[in-house]
């Protein structure tokens, strides 16, 4: 399987957003996917800093706004992803951006 790598070369847990725009918004039918070592059933989800699920699936459709993280055994906790319920949002691609990159912004409401 594919294991994401940090710049230092260590394996890390990644929380992926679909559609791939940040900040994510609830009315976009957001799916979160947790990638890391171990089996998909070993995923632990957190919402707003509290354990929200244990031994759950590696992906789900978001139905509540909040800040989500996931944890996988061996690669630890992911970076947080905020899902908003705002009526108007300025979005950037959900990927690492470097100075000098050409970026498409989306203003959506």
Image (cartoon, rainbow, N blue to C red):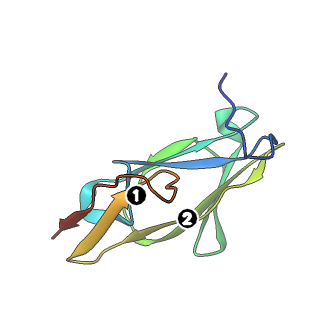
Q: Count of labels shown?
A: 2
Please report contact status of discs 1 and 2: CB closer than 8 Å, yes or no.
yes
Q: Quadrant of the N terminus?
A: top right
Residue 91 numbered tag = none
Question: SS of the residue at dot 1?
Answer: loop
Q: Which residue is mark 1?
A: 62
> Which is nearer the eye, 99 or 92?
99
Looking at the image, residue 80 sits to the left or right of residue 26; the answer is right
Location of residue 35 in the rendering, given as x and y in whole percent from the top left corner: 62, 40
Ranked by sequence position, the earlier of labels 1 and 2 is 1
Work out whether 81 lies above or below 36: below
Q: Which residue is mark 2?
A: 68
Label 1 CA crowd tier, 10 Å (few <14, some 14–19, many 20+): some
Work out whether 109 lies above or below 19: below
Location of residue 68 in the rendering, given as x and y in whole percent from the top left corner: 55, 64
Question: SS of the residue at dot 2?
Answer: strand
Residue at 79% x, 45% y is 75
Q: Quadrant of residue 89?
A: bottom left
Residue at 71% x, 32% y is 39
Looking at the image, residue 16 sits to the left or right of residue 9; the answer is left
Looking at the image, residue 8 sits to the left or right of residue 32; the answer is right
Location of residue 109 in the rendering, given as x and y in whole percent from the top left corner: 15, 70
Q: Nearer the viewer, mark 1 or mark 2?
A: 2
Work out whether 98 lies above or below 52: above
Residue at 28% x, 71% y is 90
> Which is nearer the eye, 56 or 92?
92
Considering every residue shown, the one lying at the far front of the view is 100
Location of residue 19 in the rendering, given as x and y in whole percent from the top left corner: 33, 48
**C-alpha span from label 1 to label 2:** 10 Å
> Which is nearer the eye, 16 or 57?
16
């Amino acid at each position: 399987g594919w294991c994401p790598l940090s710049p230092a070369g260590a394996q890390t847990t990644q929380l992926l957003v679909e559609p791939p725009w940040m900040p994510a918004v609830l009315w976009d039918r957001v799916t979160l996917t947790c990638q890391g070592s171990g089996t998909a059933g070993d995923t632990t989800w957190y919402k707003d800093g509290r354990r929200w699920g244990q031994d759950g699936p590696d992906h789900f459709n978001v139905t509540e706004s909040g800040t989500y993280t996931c944890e996988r055994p061996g690669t630890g906790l992911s970076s947080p992803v905020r899902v908003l319920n705002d009526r108007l949002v300025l979005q950037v691609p959900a990927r690492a951006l470097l100075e000098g990159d050409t970026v498409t912004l989306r203003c959506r409401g």
